[in-house]
Amino acid sequence: MRMKLFFILVCLSCLTVTCNSVKKPVVDNMIVAGKIDSIYSKILGEERKIWVYVPASDDLYSELSYPVVYLLDGDAHFFSVMGIIQQLSEVNMNMVLPRMILIGITNTDRPRDLTPSHVTTDGEIPDSNFFTTSGGSEKFTSFIEKELIPFVDSSYSASPYRILIGHS
């Protein structure tokens, strides 16, 4: 019985030390979730903002590089996807997922970037101007492939494993 109690106390002590050694994302009494970065796209002819989350590193779990999740509609879904990634890879020593970098790609012209062909009319959309710029997804995917991914690879500790998340 004493051996079991000793073992439990040692495990709890190790768990407390491990949990307390993980760096908390707090700076000047602010909870920090990530940062906003930007890249000028020659392909799209505009400045694009990206929301970036990089997992907290510590000596116990320091990694050279992380897989990268590219998230469409990043400004709308950044915090929920970041929370899922943190919960499944960091919180309470979870290791369901590896720690990952999250890149939220914000929208500047959603109909242009996410539609493959130009739409002239849509009876279900009351705003007839909604699709005037539609049909630019080929340029948008080219931006991701030729400009954004190389930018992220050179600016962050990114591994070559990548995931693209979108919806609709």
Image (cartoon, rainbow, N blue to C red):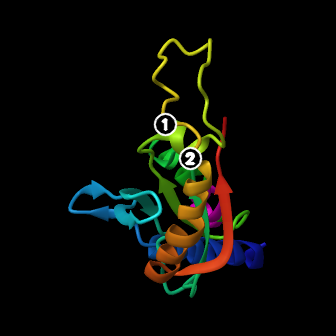
Q: Quadrant of residue 65?
A: bottom right
Specify the quadrant that holds the C terminus. top right
Q: Amino acid at mark 2?
A: Gly
Mark pair 1, 2: CA separation: 8 Å
Q: Is residue 133 visible?
A: yes
Would you place residue 129 above or below residue 135 in this image? above
Is 41 or 19 nearer to us in this picture?
A: 41
Q: Residues within 10 Å of mark 2 (few under 14, many from 20)?
A: some
**Mark 1–mark 2 CB contact (< 8 Å):** yes
Residue 117 picture quarter: top right
Relative height, residue 104 to residue 14 (above, below): above
Q: What residue is shown at x 45% (from left), y 41% (from top)?
A: 109
- Mark identifier at residue 136: 2
**Front residue of this view, candidates 140 and 52:** 140
Q: Which mark is residue 108?
A: none
Amino acid type, callout 1: Thr
- Name the element at disc 1: loop
Q: Is residue 81 magenta?
A: no
One can see residue 19 in this view: no
Examine the rendered structure and indicate whether residue 110 appears above or below residue 36. above
Q: In the figure, is residue 138 to the left or right of 41?
A: right
Residues rendered magenta in the picture: 85-93
The image shows residue 138 at horizontal and vertical percentages of 62, 54
Disc on res. 133:
1
